[in-house]
Amino acid sequence: MLTFIQMEFLKLKRSNIFILSLIGAVLPPLLMFIAVSAFGEGNAFEQLFTNVNMYMSSLFAILLFAIIISYLFGREYNEHTLKSMLTIPISRGKFILSKYIMFLVWILILTVVTTISTAIFGFVAGLEGFTLNLLLDSFAQLLYANVLLFLTFSPFVFISLFITNMVPAMVGGAGLTLINLMVYGQNWAPFVPWVCPYLIASGEIAEYSTSVMVSYGVILLTFLVGIAISYIYFTRKDVSL
Amino acid sequence: MVDYVIETNNLSKKYSKNLVVNSVNLHVEKGKIYGLLGKNGAGKTTTMCMLLNLTYPSSGDILLFGKNPKRYPKEIYSKIGSIIETPGFYENLTAYENLKIIAKLRGNHNPNNIKRVLDMVNLDGETSKKFKDFSLGMKQRLGIAAAIMHSPELLILDEPINGLDPFGIKEIRDLLKRLSHEFGITILISSHILSEIENIADVIGFMDNGVLIEEITKDELYDKLNKYVEFKVSDVNLAIKILSDLGLKENIDFTFTDNGKICLYSNLNLRDKFNELFVNSGIAVNKVNLCEENLEDFFTRIVGNT
């Protein structure tokens, strides 16, 4: 598995999408930095970290993660490499699992980049109240939200296998972002898989009457259903050349 | 007992109502080059995909190295190198990097080995060029390098010379012959180019409309090719009369053309006697040729008969 992850990194060498995803991870901190600098929205590090985490994990990450997962799976079809990979041989189950784990590693990298860039922008903006604990707490919160979000992206694996170009993932990601905007603050937000991660990680779930276990259940169910349909579809379908 | 590396039993593939491979019984003997010949859409690629577990058969069985590949996939497929249609590689990577990924995932990464195979296919000089900038011929050669890098016992190559220039074709043909004859590698190669299969294969399988029409060795093929004697004569009508008087039937034993050509398909050993009769009857015989049907004619004939 480690070799597979290493090779996934080699596949990303000179890849624009990896660079673009890093820029994507820096975008929410940059926008918050502009908001702080230009519009004077808060002068504390804590506020900056909170805002960045909210915008990242409840909105921007949805679109970003959809593009990444679509790229990870779709490129094997679009560059006709899937037939080479499977005849190495690599089992189809291991192939899906390895790619999905690579997706998690990619998310971890983006989480680190977002947190560090937030801190840098905070210093540039001259914000007050920076502590190492604040940085670590903010990182832990964003990481937790993103890992939960990672679990809810298993249906996108199926979409990426079913329609191998990036358009459906982008449309789906944009659609989910809009849904998140619409349901955030509504009573049924804890039932929406792609909103729950932020609500749980930020602690906002306590403001809802629904038990946190229900949200965990929704995330787990989404994960299991997504993985199951992806596995069944991929292991039973002929490889398109 | 013959040692088959590939053996299929009534292998079929159906897409909805379309039967693209129909009860194929393929027999590829160890150490031989087996050429699968057929028009585009004959079912060659689908058959190869089924052998490589990229496409699932609708019915029938496959034995590779005498074993069921579903039960021993890792053991069996690690002994196989393949190219199916245009080789796919990561476009942002160089030839070396692409081969490194495959070698690492196979668990037999050796930089010297990668350099050796790149040298074999004349890509050793392309150290910084990305795959997306490769010509079709270079892509094909990299595909062959990837297929042979792990010293496989069986190569399954679907149209491997597509896109190669004549020099490239010769190089790859010589390489495949060397791999088979020196290293004993069994090769299943498909092509719609008859001359290529004729050049390289020890055994030829003819496929059309998903059916494996015939499987024959090259020696058997030459025995099966129709032979005929061609006479170029000054008086066709008189020559026809002479042959008819001898009991030979038009369109069965011989045919003729208006420009003075008579093709004799039977009694070939009596051609000197026929020549003598023609000359004695005052016919000028300008040419007598013993001709043989070529692979193209044979292919057309057997495909036409199905």
Image (cartoon, coloured by chain):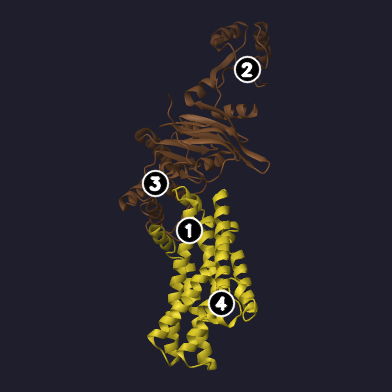
Label 4: few (<14), some or many (≥20) within 10 Å? many
Mark with earlier residue (3, 2): 3
User: Which chain's residue wears label 1?
Assistant: A
Determine contact: label 3, label 4, CB under 8 Å. Answer: no
Q: How far apart are the alpha carbons under marks 4 and 1? A: 25 Å
Where is mark 1, residue-wise?
A97
The percent position of residue A95, horizontal first and vertical second, equals 48, 55
Distance from disc 4 to disc 2, alpha carbons, whole Å, reads 86 Å
Residue drawn 48% across the image and 74% down it: A144
Q: Nearer the viewer, residue A71 or B215?
A: A71
Residue marked by disc 2: B262
- Mark 4 vs mark 2, foreground winner is 4
Q: Quadrant of the N terminus of chain B?
A: top left
Q: Which chain's colour is yellow?
A: A
Please say whether residue B219 is visible from this viewpoint: yes
Instruction: Decide which of tag 4 and tag 1 comes sooner along the chain.
Output: 4
> Which amino acid lies under the numbered mark 4 shown in the image of this protein?
Ser
Q: Residue B302, located in which quarter of the rendered image?
A: top right
Q: Tag 3's secondary structure?
A: loop
- The chain in brown: B
Residue under the image location 47 percent in, 70 percent down = A107
Instruction: Name the residue that disc number 4 marks.
Output: A58
Point out the frontmost of discs 1 and 3.
1
Instruction: Residue type at mark 3: give it.
Output: Val
